[in-house]
């Protein structure tokens, strides 16, 4: 595991987290093989391909780790989804050579929301995200495979995901990569520029972008997150020249969403509670 600590490094005068893309590619393809084939005896993976850079990177990695014919890329549009997202998802599937499945989730989502006509846009978006996870897990069961997660570290630290939606897959190869690092890896892997360069969006609400929702660019957020995770205090980061409003925004989001990065909290009544005391050997 010591090699993990050689991948991410911060330069003294520039907090933008950088990676060695070739090393990270080798590390993550081996991670996918190890977690699926060696640990679980499973040779197939299912990826929800949204048309964004995160799912594109995961699709490329899975194709290289398992072989394109052992990976299914599932496009799951809702009726208000961006046509461009659907086209870019199709482009990823063509470029990687993975198998394709198109599942329109509109009827399933609308069937439930018809009984909740006053649901807010946030609730509606969460229903869509969780419906997509139902599809991915069922498609995985169909081929005796495993759904692979596509959430990056920046989103996870901000809590910018649907709990028991985007975070549900049992493995996630890019969960320890900041968004800016995902962009670096995407260029190395050959993900099309049209996908890398467009504004990041969850595509749950028409016209929505991640950075507008978060109130900060990923570049600035990642620099601040990187310092926070290295142990710098808010005061240290502001003293280094960062905007106090931005630093406080990032710290507030991280603190307020800590609960989303954990499994359900279990009431302990024994010394063998699962995931508290009882761990598989690899966890020690």
Image: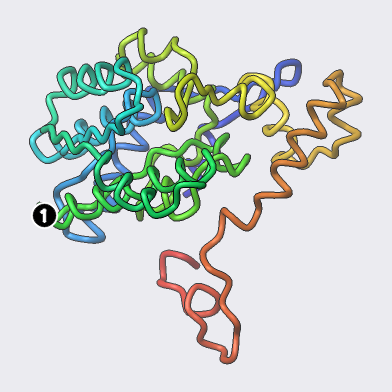
Q: Which residue is drawn at 54% across and 31% down?
A: 178
Q: Which residue is drawn at 24% across and 49% down?
A: 135
Find disc 1 in the rendering and name its residue: 142
Q: Which of 31 and 247 lies nearest the eye of the viewer?
A: 247
Where, by quadrant of the figure, is residue 24 drawn? top left
Q: Which of 263 and 38 lies nearest the eye of the viewer?
A: 263
Is residue 128 rendered to the left or right of residue 275? left
Please state the horizontal and vertical placement of residue 118, each as a whole percent of the image.
51, 47
Please state the total of marks drawn on the protein image: 1
Please state the horizontal and vertical placement of residue 276, each as a whole percent of the image.
55, 75
Q: Which of 241 and 4 lies nearest the eye of the viewer?
A: 241
Q: Which residue is drawn at 91% across and 25% down?
A: 239
Q: Which residue is drawn at 70% across and 41% down?
A: 253
Establish if 118 lies above or below 197. below
Please state the horizontal and vertical placement of residue 134, each as a whole percent of the image.
28, 53
Where, by quadrant of the figure, is residue 132 drawn? top left
Q: Residue extending furthest bottom?
A: 270
Is residue 256 rendered to the left or right of residue 247? left
Establish if 271 lies above or below 265. below
Q: What element carries label 1?
A: helix
Mark 1: give few (<14), some (14-19) or many (20+) Cα within 10 Å.
Answer: few
Please state the horizontal and vertical placement of residue 22, each as a whole percent of the image.
37, 23
């Amino acid at each position: 595991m010591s090699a993990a600590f050689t991948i991410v490094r911060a330069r003294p005068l520039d907090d933008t987290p950088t990676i060695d893309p070739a090393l990270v590619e080798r590390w993550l393809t081996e991670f996918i093989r190890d977690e699926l084939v060696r640990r679980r005896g499973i040779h197939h993976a299912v990826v929800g391909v949204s048309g964004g850079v995160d799912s594109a990177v995961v699709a490329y990695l899975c194709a290289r780790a398992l072989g394109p014919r052992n990976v299914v890329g599932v496009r799951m549009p809702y009726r208000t989804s961006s046509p461009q997202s659907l086209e870019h998802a199709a482009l990823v599937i063509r470029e990687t050579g993975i198998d394709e499945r198109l599942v329109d989730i509109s009827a399933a989502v609308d069937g439930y929301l018809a009984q909740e006509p006053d649901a807010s846009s946030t609730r509606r978006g969460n229903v869509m995200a969780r419906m997509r996870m139902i599809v991915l897990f069922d498609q995985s069961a169909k081929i005796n495979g495993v759904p692979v997660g596509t959430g990056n570290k920046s989103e996870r630290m901000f809590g910018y995901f649907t709990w028991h939606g985007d975070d549900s897959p049992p493995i996630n190869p890019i969960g320890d990569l900041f968004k800016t690092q995902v962009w670096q890896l995407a260029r190395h892997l050959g993900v099309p520029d049209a996908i890398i360069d467009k504004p990041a969006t969850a595509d749950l609400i028409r016209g929505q972008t991640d950075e507008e929702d978060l109130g900060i660019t990923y570049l600035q957020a990642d620099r601040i997150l990187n310092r926070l995770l290295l142990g710098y205090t808010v005061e240290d980061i502001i003293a280094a020249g960062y905007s106090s409003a931005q630093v406080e925004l990032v710290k507030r989001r991280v603190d307020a969403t800590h609960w989303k990065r954990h499994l359900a909290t279990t009431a302990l009544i024994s010394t063998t509670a699962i995931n508290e005391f009882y761990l598989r050997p690899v966890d020690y």
